[in-house]
Image (cartoon, rainbow, N blue to C red):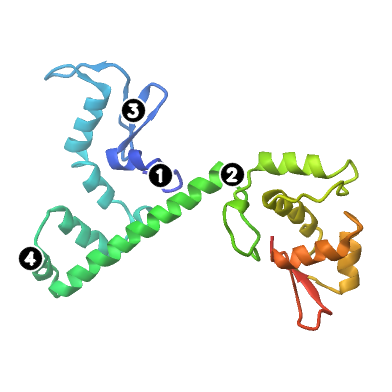
Amino acid sequence: MKSEKVYQLTDYTQGYFQENDYYHCLYCDQSYEEGLIYTIDQPMTAVKAMKKHLDTVHHGPLSALLSQSKEISGLTEIQQEILTLFAQQLPDAVIAQRLGISTSTVRNHRFKLKEKQRQSYVFLSIMSLLQSDEYLIPHTGATMVDDRYQITEAEKSKVLATYLDDEGRIKQFPSKEKRKIIVLTEIARQFDPQKNYSESAVNEIIKRFIEDYVTIRRYLIEYGFLKRTKDGKTYWATSA
């Protein structure tokens, strides 16, 4: 198995992947073309032939996965060993005796592995959403994050085209919350999170978009795009 290649979850659990009209083993160069495979015993489908290959050569998908290196599985040596024993459905007391540890330590391993499973699902979900690029991530200073922040690129483009003119100035500030956030996000992009700004500097940036800088400045603070010191002399942008 190539450590740099990312397969689907179903590929890992079944031990092979499909590409065009071929089924490829994850652990060796064996592949079968879609259709009937003729063997000495009897004809079988490509999928059945691949499953038989995995059972006879690699001792099944689970055994094949457990035999992978740490670089691929992410498992420590003890985790790999204890999972192999779990796969044999042995009682905790028997596993403890074989490893020379206490039964409570075996139970603790079970708990930690369950935690690792939960974290893996969360990580997979994050990676899947990152690749889909469907929703924009709220800015880090966002307050009361809710469905107002479920903004797609298509929604963003439509709102900006509606409320900003050809020169990028606001024709009319929107009243609906989601649209308001989209326009405020566009204004907030003009502020460098690495810099501090005086109130007058903040006003000048806002006036590039609209004359009513007082209202927009208040919104930028209220929605967490900008922060300021208690005396109101210094402003800075939260990271985008």
Based on the displayed image, in which of its 4 quarters is residue 93 positioned?
A: bottom left
What residue is shown with label 1?
2
Residue under pointer 2:
133
Using the numbered discs, state the Cα–Cα distance from disc 4 to disc 3 in whole angstroms.
39 Å
Crowd rating for badge 4 (residues with CA inside 10 Å; few <14, some 14–19, many 20+): few
Dot 1 falls on a residue whose secondary structure is: loop
Q: x%, y% of residue 210?
A: 89, 55
Number of the label disc, if any, that sits on residue 23: 3
**Mark 2: which amino acid?**
Asp
Mark 2 / mark 3, whichever is N-terminal: 3
The amino acid sitting under disc 1 is Lys
Q: Position of residue 39 (x, y in %)?
A: 17, 19
Callout 2: SS: loop
Disc on the earlier residue, 4 or 2: 4
Whichever of callouts 2 and 1 sits on the residue coming sooner in the sequence is 1
SS under mark 4: helix
